[in-house]
Image (spheres, rainbow, N blue to C red):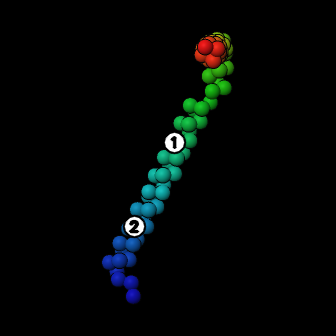
Amino acid sequence: MDNPDYSEEREELLQSIEHDREEVRVALHELSDAAGHKLDVSDRIRSSPLTWALGAFLIGAWLGDRTASHESAHRSWRDA
């Protein structure tokens, strides 16, 4: 019933699919390792906590200043 040419081609396709699956598994493993290293912020904070605290303070001050400026501009426009 099965043509020998088709059986051989089918076997080659199945091997190719299995090879591709293995490549995808390896790529996903490497990606998860890379993401884990980049997203591990706690180690970076522990290595230089003062720098992170100063950076957080400066960002907070900048955002607070922007909010205060926006609110005063909004009040000025509303009062006019």
Q: State the CA–CA distance, disc 1 to disc 2.
A: 26 Å
Query: Tag count in the figure?
Result: 2
For residue 55, say whether it is visible: no
Crowd tier of the residue under label 1, counting other residues whose Cα lies within 10 Å: few below 14, some 14–19, many 20 or above: few
Instruction: State the residue position of label 1.
Output: 30
Residue in the foreground of this view, choosing between 28 and 66:
66
Residue 64: % across, % down: 65, 15
User: Circle 1 sits in a helix, a strand or a loop, which is it?
Assistant: helix
Instruction: State the residue position of label 2.
Output: 13
Closer to the N terminus: mark 1 or mark 2? 2
Hey, what amino acid is under mark 1? Glu
Crowd tier of the residue under label 2, counting other residues whose Cα lies within 10 Å: few below 14, some 14–19, many 20 or above: few
Hey, what amino acid is under mark 2? Leu
Residue 76: % across, % down: 62, 13
Look at 64% across and 24% down and name the residue there: 43
Q: Is residue 39 above or below residue 20?
A: above
Q: Is residue 61 above or below residue 23?
A: above
